[in-house]
Amino acid sequence: MGVFVYLLRCADGSFYTGSAIGDLSKRIAEHDAGTYPGYTSKRRPISLVWSQYFEQIPDALAAERQIKGWSRSKKQALIDSNWDALAYFAKRKNVRLKPNCG
């Protein structure tokens, strides 16, 4: 049984990163119902905006931890599958070049 890593958009526009073993739709329903107290229970309704399945739990947990550390812009690039923007935001701020600079 594998693990899903997912991003939710909350009612206040913030993002929540989490993981679910097995049934992703059940976990999303729990968030949306406010089943457990926490970040999303106070920011409902929520919507699933991105997810990825991992066969191995350690791989999923590493991805979840990594995404939690990302900026909002980088998470939005992942959601949009904008790989150029994702690469841009992955660079350290002091070495970034504006995309249209030549």
Image (tube, rainbow, N blue to C red):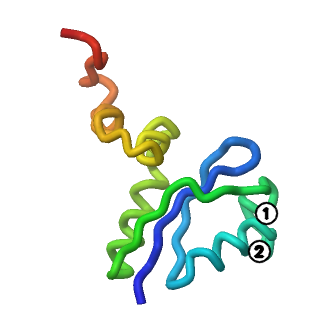
Q: Amino acid at mark 2?
A: Tyr
Left or right: 94, with 18 as reference point = left
Q: Residue at 75% of width from left, 43% of height from top? A: 12
Q: Is residue 26 above or below residue 79?
A: below
Q: Residue at 56% of width from left, 82% of height from top? A: 23
Q: Is 49 or 20 nearer to us in this picture?
A: 49
Instruction: Look at the image and tell me in which quarter the N terminus lies.
Output: bottom left
Q: Is 92 or 48 nearer to us in this picture?
A: 48
Q: Residue at 49% of width from left, 41% of height from top? A: 76
The answer to whether the residues at label 1 and label 2 have Cβ atoms under 8 Å apart is yes
Left or right: 4, with 25 as reference point = left
Please report whichever mark, 1 or 2, sits nearer to the chain's N-terminal start: 2
Q: Residue at 60% of width from left, 59% of height from top? A: 48
Q: Is residue 46 above or below residue 28?
A: above
Badge number at residue 7:
none
| Residue 67 on image: x %, y % | 44, 54
The residue carrying mark 2 is 36
Distance from the alpha carbon under mark 1 to that under mark 2: 7 Å
Q: Is 14 or 53 nearer to us in this picture?
A: 53
Q: Is residue 76 above or below residue 68?
A: above
Q: Which secondary structure lies at badge 1?
A: helix
> In the rendered image, which quarter is residue 16 located in?
bottom right
> In the rendered image, which quarter is residue 102 located in?
top left
Left or right: 36, with 91 as reference point = right
For the image, the number of numbered tags is 2
Badge number at residue 41:
1
Q: Which secondary structure lies at badge 2?
A: loop
Q: Amino acid at mark 1?
A: Ser
How many other residues sit within 10 Å of disc 2, few (<14), some (14-19) or many (≥20)?
few
| Residue 6 on image: x %, y % | 51, 63
| Residue 60 on image: x %, y % | 39, 72
The residue at the far left in this view is: 102
